[in-house]
Image (spheres, helix red, strand yellow):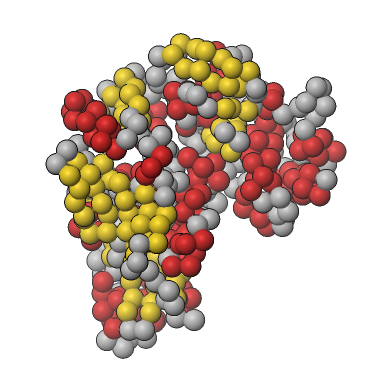
């Protein structure tokens, strides 16, 4: 399969990338690692007329301790998120979830920013960063703005990013001492999750988000509220799908997904409560 | 567009369409047909090559993204007619049946050992999750990788 023809331009910096995307308008797309975009283009589900390759904007590949949070450059590859000593110490849930994205070849190319900007509810990192209460930083022609993960996902592959905005940084609060768990249920090793759960608990607080349980990653706020109110893990897990709106597809029916979500949230909370 | 890519140590200057995939570039432009196309959807790993020393699926990389970079294909693994230790290990341990997945397996396995020189059996199985063998010959593939690691 070969993508539809397009013009290819390479940006050397975020500012140049934003200027290039501005010149080419709505028909242009940013290309980072390409592991979400190129498969869509090969299937002709996407046919941008211009690709602005940001894969070499190397100053957006970093993981830094920024005081109360860890700052991750949008072009940091999954493999580097997975192996980051800083993340393993301060946000191990994210490092672990990154190790479940695709397979090693995919993780050598795919980036955390690309995955989040693609806004696929079936991907692992949108839901994981949502559970962690992350903030995303976007840069546009008029400067940068912060977008809470809770405000970012608007619909299937739809995000709060404007066409001429580029995701540049992901900020994840430090979570030392939190219990955490990542549950991914799939049929084959490298598949997307049929349902996935990212969860953490610390003192009275918790965060639970669901993969592939709707058109966006879902924050399971009813579960967190129930836990805060003193509910048991198994009672709270019964509320797993309260905010979800799962689809029927080849892999699973709606009912099966709801069942899976309850089981996986219970398992995740049990692991996170240890 | 003009690209220059070093493939198996040789610099190539080529004029390609931007939409040219790396796998088509190595197979059709350079004639290196050892890299196979399997699923063509970044699932099976048959098309795995090394890009700057790391395994990638060349059906999901543009040749343009490899511009200025270094690529190694299965043809670049042997030195002066002597097989790479991983290739040797596959041969000695019956790590191939029909052989279609083998080039990709060898490229993925050598990349894995670079990152984890002494993997456990489980780590080999997880590390090769991106490569499918439709003969289901995984047992001897894993054995081959462990044998290569022990060399």
Rendered-image quadrant of the N terminus of chain A: top left
Residue at x 62%, y 53% (from the top left corner): B126
Residue B149, horizontal then vertical, whole percent: 77, 48
Residue A255, horizontal then vertical, whole percent: 34, 62
Residue B40, horizontal then vertical, whole percent: 50, 30
Image quarter for residue A236? bottom left
Number of labelled discs? 0
Residue B24, horizontal then vertical, whole percent: 52, 20
Question: In the displayed structure, would residue A187 be above or below residue A6?
Answer: below
Residue at x 45%, y 20% (from the top left corner): B20
Question: In the displayed structure, would residue B8 be above or below residue B50?
Answer: above
Image quarter for residue A118? top left
User: Left or right: B117 with respect to A13?
Assistant: right
Q: Residue furthest left?
A: A142
User: Left or right: A153 with respect to A234?
Assistant: left
Residue A210 visible (yes or no): no
Q: Which residue lies furthest to the right in this view?
A: B92
């Amino acid at each position: 399969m070969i993508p539809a023809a397009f013009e290819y331009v390479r940006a050397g910096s975020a500012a140049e990338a934003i200027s290039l995307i501005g010149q080419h308008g709505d028909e242009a797309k940013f290309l980072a690692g390409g592991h979400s975009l190129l498969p869509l283009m090969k299937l002709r589900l996407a046919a941008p007329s211009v690709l602005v390759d940001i894969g070499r904007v190397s100053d957006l590949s970093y993981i830094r301790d920024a005081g109360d949070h860890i700052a991750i450059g949008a072009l940091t590859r999954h493999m580097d998120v997975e192996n980051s000593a800083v993340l393993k110490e301060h946000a191990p849930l994210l490092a672990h979830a990154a190790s479940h994205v695709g397979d090693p070849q995919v993780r050598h190319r795919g980036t955390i920013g690309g995955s989040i900007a693609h806004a696929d509810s079936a991907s692992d990192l949108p839901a994981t960063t949502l559970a962690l209460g992350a903030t995303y930083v976007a840069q546009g022609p008029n400067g940068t703005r912060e977008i809470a993960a809770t405000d970012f996902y608007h619909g299937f592959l739809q995000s709060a990013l404007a066409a001429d905005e580029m995701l540049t940084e992901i900020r994840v609060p430090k979570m030392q001492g939190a219990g955490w768990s990542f549950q991914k249920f799939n049929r084959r090793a490298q598949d997307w999750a049929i349902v996935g759960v990212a969860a953490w608990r610390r003192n009275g607080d918790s965060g639970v988000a669901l993969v592939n349980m709707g058109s966006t990653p879902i924050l399971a706020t009813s579960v967190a509220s129930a836990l805060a109110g003193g509910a048991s893990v198994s009672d709270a897990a019964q509320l797993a799908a309260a905010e979800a709106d799962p689809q029927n597809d080849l892999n699973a029916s709606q009912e099966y997904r709801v069942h899976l979500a309850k089981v996986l949230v219970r398992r995740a909370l049990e692991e996170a409560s240890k | 567009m003009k690209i220059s890519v070093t493939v198996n140590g040789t610099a190539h200057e080529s004029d390609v369409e931007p939409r040219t995939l790396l796998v088509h570039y190595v197979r059709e432009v350079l004639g290196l047909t050892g890299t196979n196309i399997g699923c063509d959807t970044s699932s099976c790993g048959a098309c795995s090559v090394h890009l700057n020393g790391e395994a990638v699926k060349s059906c999901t990389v543009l040749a343009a993204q490899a511009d200025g970079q270094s690529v190694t294909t299965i043809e670049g693994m042997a030195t002066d007619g002597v097989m790479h230790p991983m290739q040797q290990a596959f041969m000695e341990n019956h790590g191939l049946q029909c052989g279609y997945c083998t080039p990709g397996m060898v490229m993925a396995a050598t990349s894995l050992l670079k990152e984890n020189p002494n993997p456990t059996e489980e780590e080999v199985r997880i590390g090769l999750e991106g490569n499918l063998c439709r003969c289901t010959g995984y047992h001897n593939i894993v054995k081959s990788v462990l044998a290569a690691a022990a060399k």
